[in-house]
Image: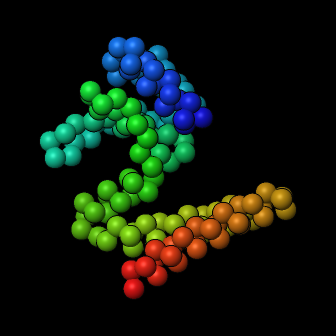
Amino acid sequence: MTRDLLARCRASHSAGMTFPKVWATILRGHPAVMAEPKLMIDAGRPWVEVPLATGEHLAYEEPIGFWIVSELDLLRRARVGKGLDPEQATARRLRHKAEELRTFAASMSSDAKRTILGLADTYDRIADGIEGAER
């Protein structure tokens, strides 16, 4: 759904639509959009980010257009801005997500539970790899 939404926004931008028009006609009310757009500024460069249900953000900057910012990119940006090691922060976030998934899986049927627990284990293995690479 995120990629389809991105493609629609990019096509509209290519056709000459401004961000406010794309917001009004495509994004507002879309089930993947979780909140109003937020203005961001980095090194004097302004852009807009729209939080999505996937944890990603749909970003827009003139004249570049639209792109997707992943949850891990958002975390890294927040941690780097606070002077924390981005890899360690990412590993911690992955472990936290794995715990959330394990808690959620407790209420699932056996097939769904296996899939969710497998994803949680994958998050832990990625975190292990990040922490191992730092040593």
Near-viewer residue (78 or 103): 78
Taking 109 as reference, is 10 above or below it? above
Seen at 45% across and 25% down, the residue is: 9
Name the foreground residue: 58 vs 63: 63
Residue 16's x, y, as percent? Answer: 35, 14
Q: Residue at x 33, y 18 (%)?
A: 18
Residue 39 vertical placement versus 129 (above, below): above
Q: Answer whether residue 44 is visible to the viewer in this image.
A: yes
Where is residue 109 drawn, in percent x and y?
84, 58
Res 19 → quadrant = top left
Q: Quadrant of the C terminus?
A: bottom left
Looking at the rendered structure, the number of numbered marks drawn on it comes to 0
Horizontal and vertical percent for residue 24? Answer: 43, 18
Q: Name the residue located 55 percent from the left edge and 45 percent from the top edge.
A: 54
Q: How is the image coloured?
A: rainbow
Residue furthest to the bottom = 135
Residue furthest right in the image: 110
Taking 91 as reference, is 83 left or right? left
Residue 41 image point, x, y percent:
22, 42
Residue 28 in view of the camera: no
Compared to residue 110, the image places residue 33 above or below, namely above
- Snapshot quadrant of residue 65: top left
Image quarter in which the N terminus is found: top right
**5 or 31, which lies in front?**
5
**Which residue is depicted at the point 26% across and 28% down?**
62
Q: Is residue 9 above or below residue 100?
A: above
